[in-house]
Amino acid sequence: STQSTGSSGINAEYGGQKSGTFQYNTRLSKRDSPSSLSKQASPSSQIIQEINHDYYKSLIFVNDSAWIEINPTKTSFDQDVVHEGLSSSFRYAYNILLPFTFPYYGLPLETITPTTGGFIFVGELIHNQLTETQYIAPLMAEFDPSLGNDSYIYYYLSDNVAIVQWDNVYLHSDYDPNSSDNQAFTFQAQLYKSGDIVFAYKEVPYHPKLIDDTSHYVRVGIAEAYYEVDTSHGVTVTYVHQYHSIDLDFDLVVNYTEITLQAEKTCLSSKSCADCTTQEIDFECSWCPKIQQCSDGISRWRQNWKDANCDASGVTKLETCPNEEESALPSTHASTGFYEIVLCQDSKTAIVCSGEDTLLIDSASFSRTNYYGSLCQRRGEGNDGSQCQYDNDYVLNKLAAKCNHNRACIVEASAEFFETDPCPDTPKTLNVYYKCKSHATAADKALIAFIVILLLCLVGGLALWVVYAYRNPTTPSGLFLIKYGRFWKGSIYKEDTGESGI
């Protein structure tokens, strides 16, 4: 199939018809590498609606400031943003590898699958009912980019955002090849490294309620599901069950409107038992030691959770957490080699060491300058020039007093913890660098002590035996030492007979 730089075609034609639970066996596997670019959106202004949906909070804006133009005829890029495969197809989906990990419902995604139908499929298994579950849909409908010579699907990738733009696309059922009055849609989805999702609309010629949904769903929103595997009579079938969706009002889809879905913290974002059991979120999280996972039992990985019997064995209290494993540790800083965590204002997390190792805070800073360019900085928020920060030594001493010599420690980026705030109402970011100091366990110490005592006894016993044999040469020990000891043979018991030895 035709493909463009940065993506690989999965050659998958999807069905948009409405149906119930479906079965499939195909697994998505093809991937390629994207280019790395950067571009920032301008800040939006007027919020007209705000709704909390548990996993996400939706914010509706009424201007066009969120639009990031990636049409190459209207802006300049150093990467080819045209997806030739999608732009010349109908009901097709292509897989794209992201340059960053995108948290979707807390689940880390490395790939996305844009489609011709105004949505992005985010599941792991490709099947012919992509419109049913696991989608990000700025405007899901039966779009057909192959109908127009000026219809394209563009994609743009940078270190912190991935954008898919359906540009001047026509609806398959409404298109008349003999008419010059066909109406096209232009809109985009922006996926941010923070997990935030933005839908931006530039050209929506008529209300989405007027779009024919006979042969293809018409939707605006997102959905996620979990997989369930069933094997019977030698046949393995994988089922997909949707566990959450956000269906947005079609009235919001008009020109120059932005819909932002701000990601909330979920259980899956915790990588350690300590963090999992101390989160203060709207989910009842528990830690499953067997699979090293934090969950409320409902996520895409539900099958693993059930297979490991995590509902029964899950840990919910910090004091009952087992020793952490290496997977619980964060990434290390490239230049220092220390473990690094980044914590946003008024949030907290647990820092841990694996096994019996204990914490040692090396350095820390809590400042506004840390905020710029971090995951804490909201999309479109500019640099206000503030240099406000806590004294670094003060921050280090506070954290060291609480965390040093412990296997786990709860760290807070708040004025309450630090007992002061040099600039209230100004968001700051806490950066902490630490290492894990190895300590022998009680059993290790006992074993080492035993070995040392044993060696001392052996050396002492040998020394006493040599002294005894030396002073008593006619005893069996003395004769043995005379026979096999070079020192005795060569000097002490040498007879004056002209021959060596005894």
Image (cartoon, helix red, strand yellow):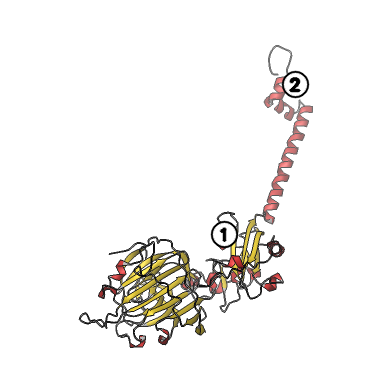
Q: Secondary structure under badge 2?
A: helix
> Which amino acid, mark 1?
Glu
Please name the residue that numbered disc 1 is placed on: 326
Please name the residue that numbered disc 2 is placed on: 492
Q: Estimate the x, y position of residue 308 in percent, counting from the top left.
A: 51, 69
Q: Estimate the x, y position of residue 464 in percent, counting from the top left.
A: 77, 35
The label shown at residue 407 is none
> Which amino acid, mark 2?
Ile
**Which one is nearer the viewer's eye here, 90 or 26?**
90
Report whether residue 441 is seen.
yes
- Decide if residue 337 is on the left or right side of residue 247: right
- Residue under the image location 40 percent in, 78 percent down: 137
**Which one is nearer the viewer's eye here, 217 or 385?**
385
The quadrant in which residue 166 appears is: bottom left
Split into 4 quadrants, where in the image is the N terminus?
bottom left
Q: Estimate the x, y position of residue 462 in percent, counting from the top left.
A: 73, 35
**Which one is nearer the viewer's eye here, 165 or 493?**
165
- Decide if residue 1 is on the left or right side of residue 406: left
Split into 4 quadrants, where in the image is the C terminus?
top right
Residue 356 versus residue 184 in the image, above or below:
above
**Which one is nearer the viewer's eye here, 329 or 319?**
329
Q: Estimate the x, y position of residue 331 in percent, counting from the top left.
A: 55, 60
Report whether residue 27 is seen.
no
